[in-house]
Image: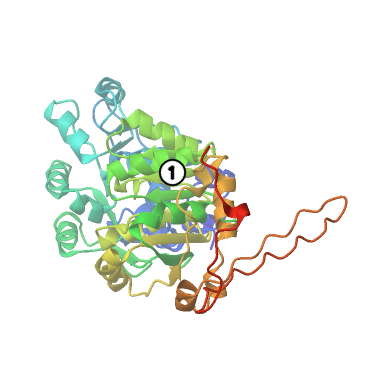
Amino acid sequence: MSFADLGLSEELLRAIDESGYTEPTPIQRGAIPSVLMNRDLVGIAQTGTGKTAAFVLPMIDILGHGRSRARMPRSLILEPTRELAAQVAENFEKYGKYHKLSMALLIGGVQMGDQVKALEKGVDVLIATPGRLMDLFSRGKIMLNDCNLLVIDEADRMLDMGFIPDIEEIASRLPKQRQTLLFSATMPPPIQKLAAKFLSEPKTIEVARPATANVNIEQRLVVTRGDKKRDVLRDLLRHEEFKNAIIFCNRKTTVRELYTSLKRSGFAVGQIHGDMEQPARIAEFDRFKRDEINILVASDVAARGLDVKGVSHVINFDVPWQPDDYIHRIGRTGRAGAQGIAITLATKEDAEAVAQIEKLTGLKIPRVVQAATEPAAEEAAPAERPRRERRERKSPPAAAQPEPRLERTEPPPRRQREPEPTAERAEPSPRRPREPEPAEEGGWNGPLPDFLSVSLS
């Protein structure tokens, strides 16, 4: 099946072709025709399956007919994070290049004045995070009376972040006669309840078992010690199969510390975490996308928002606290049918968290025991390296000492020093006469010989 078989317009097919895509993914094949028929939809799909295009593409054709009015967006897409919202906006720009659609992006960390100006001109597509949307709504800067298409993306993540009450408030202010699309990687009971309340006879499309990792991702669990994790990580990043990587940490402080450590070791590395201002985070992400850096250290704020083609590795420097986060982290690789590798560094203290992940995914992650190099060996001063090498050469290996106890109690005799070579061989010195034995009874007891006398003058 091709995109042309899904009923999309010629202008949209042209933009898709120029983007390099030829065949729709399973979620796109199932969702696009239903969305074009104005049906409500529940899409259950893991990350990296192309679900963003599954609602962006038909929305572009639907919105191609009609005009927008000031402060009254015609459609609304809710995203849990700024990064996801920004990437959905990029998708509209890429695929809607031959459609005259206006768009506004409402996210925190950005000047509100520019966003208000865009709304006053009228927009066809409003992409927003719930917090900023509620803020503008309370200020009277936006009305939702003319919004006839609502998309709730990453609904399970919305639940984790506590946005469900905001979503219910927003949905209640939209026209009752509207089309609603809900996408989620999992369907816990609160999300099922949300769908039952706000969707009308939705079509459900499930392209993978909930919480199942992408089959294109090779998963590995590297067992190591906590004090060896940075050394093991450096070894992995220097491996010949490595191209680029997103490295996830549980804490913002760990992100900063690991970023500094890798930078000192000479790696091209950037960082993204919640304490950074939004422009700085976007700038770091853009550097990674342009291959100016090939390593990005991130906290979970970016786990569901980063969408980059060709990420070869995802590395969990910390085992995630929540099993669901594991699925979303490793989903940054193996996207759009490509192969990827996900490596998790685990210590014995992480055993319970690893067991929860394996219970959720239903898969046993293959273990790899990685021997790290000597800590900070690559950072040793040049003058110290020969000294270390001499110590290593001087110390015999343990295998050459089969009986260490005997060697400690009976050390081998010292090797006598060889005489220095001379031009003419010297005559051998006469052997020193043996000391006389103590005189036996009847032996010498005469006066002291003259040559042993001592002068006191």
Which x, y percent locates residue 4?
53, 55
Picture mark count: 1
**Is 307 above or below relative to 102?**
below
Where residue 124 sits in the image (x, y, percent)?
33, 34
Residue 202 seen from this side:
yes
At x 23% / y 48%, what residue is drawn?
178
- The part of the image, by quadrant, that contains residue 361 is bottom left
- Name of the residue lying farthest toward the front: 446
Residue at x 48%, y 61% (from the top left corner)? 341
Three-letter code for the amino acid on which mark 1 is drawn = Leu
**Residue 14 percent across, percent down from the top left:** 56, 44
Q: Nearer the viewer, residue 266 or 198?
A: 266
**Location of residue 196 with respect to 409 vertically, above or below:** above
Q: Give residue 208's quadrant in the image.
A: bottom left
Name the residue that disc number 1 marks.
Answer: 296
Please give the name of the residue rendered at 45% of the width and 69% of the height, measured from the top-left corner: 368
Q: Residue furthest right?
A: 424
Image vertical order of residue 213 relative to residue 233, above or below: below
